[in-house]
Image: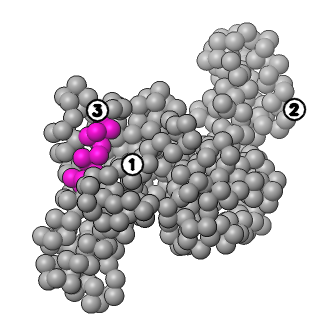
Amino acid sequence: MNVPYRVLSLLRDNGPLSRAQLADRLEVPRPRLLAELDRLVATGKVLDAGPAASRGGRRSTLVRLDPGLRFAAVDLGASSIDIEITNGGLDPVASYSETADIRSGPVGILGRVSELLHKLGAKGHYTRLDAIGIGLPGPVSFRDGVPVSPPIMVGWNRYPVRDTLAREHDCPVVVDNDVNVMALGERHSGVARSVEHLLFVKIGSGIGSGMQHHGRIYRGAEGCAGDIGHIQVETEGPVCTCGNTGCLEAYFGGASLARDATAAALTGRSPALAARLAERGALTAVDVAECATGGDTAAIGLIRTGGQRVGQVLATLVSFMNPSMIVIGGGLAGLGYLLLAEIRSVVYKRSLPLATGNLPIVMSELGPRAGVVGAALLASELAYGGE
């Protein structure tokens, strides 16, 4: 048993605990626990926090994480940078978000990330960082800390993301796919708390999934498990960013939805979308959602068709993985109940009753924070010595 990691993770997830409580939960000999606590105090990770409430007899001493511990959580999207600084218990200390184009390349994007982190430090939100966790919108070699042939990240292939940030900030860094990171965040602090077999689906600029088996992320042999956006749903179809045709992502996702909404506006099938296109010059998923809420039949049809295609792929995954919960997140989760209802309808219809009889399919509780929460959790696992 990795006792130091277990101690630190218990304090992270539960707050201050007494030495007696730690001994009870860890089920290790008290002399060993006390020796490990002394080592953690010496390394500056934990502090004594005064006497605990009496349980009869001599009162035990409370132990807490050092309040100066700091983690940086970075969630990079196709068009955004989200950063959160947290304490050792993953409570947010500071946050910042801005738009950014991931296609501008790793030097510019990571340079901006470092600039923002230094600014947050200069404002007093941290003295030093104990670890950084970062999620990227593409396939990642978790072992090497680099993206691998990411379809929407031009110029990022094999770029040393982990090593670049580690040198700049003099702390350990962990890099993972953004959907894996979101799945970790949702299970730790969102609607999927303690769910053992979770399928988290991100529908944003692209589509991907994070899979947890017995509470642990399943990354596959090379780290690209869950890349469902490039599952072919039609043998003949539009060309996808990956170079193949008929992928799920080519039919539904931020760019695909904007494309189809524009076509509906230009062909006269949607007066509401046509009016918005004339006014704004371009359409987004937000326009589709708002027009659908207003009763526009073409906008409603686009969402329903997209939900059906996503449901078609998820039904296959349910039969293969048998998850205990499916959580829908990402920017297009803002399409709301109409999208969720279509996904549920197809999954429940096409999957076996044994797999769906007790299968909730729900929206993310954390919403846009899922990524930074998961990145902070990954950073803490690295700093606390998790496996």
Q: Nearer the viewer, mark 1 or mark 2?
A: 1
Q: In the rendered image, which residue does mark 1 sit on?
A: 228
Q: Earlier in the sequence, mark 2 or mark 3?
A: 2
Residue visible at 57% across and 41% down?
Answer: 222
> Local crowd at mark 1 within 10 Å, few (<14), some, or many (≥20)?
many
User: Considering only vertical position in the picture, is 353 above or below 258?
Assistant: above
- Image location of residue 328, percent across then percent down: 35, 49
Residue visible at 84% across and 27% down?
Answer: 39
User: Considering only vertical position in the picture, is 140 above or below 32?
Assistant: below
Q: Secondary structure at mark 3?
A: helix
Asked whether the viewer can see residue 365, the reply is: no
Report the magenta residues as a range.
307-319
Asked whether the viewer can see residue 349, the reply is: yes
Q: In the rendered image, which residue does mark 2 sit on?
A: 42
Look at the image and say whether residue 312 sits in the magenta stretch: yes
- Image location of residue 305, percent across then percent down: 20, 59
Q: Earlier in the sequence, mark 1 or mark 2?
A: 2
- Image location of residue 211, percent across then percent down: 44, 38
Q: Main secondary structure of the magenta part?
A: helix
User: Considering only vertical position in the picture, is 358 above or below 99?
Assistant: above
User: Considering only vertical position in the picture, is 6 above or below 112?
Assistant: above
Residue 255 is marked as none
Q: In the rendered image, which residue does mark 3 sit on?
A: 319
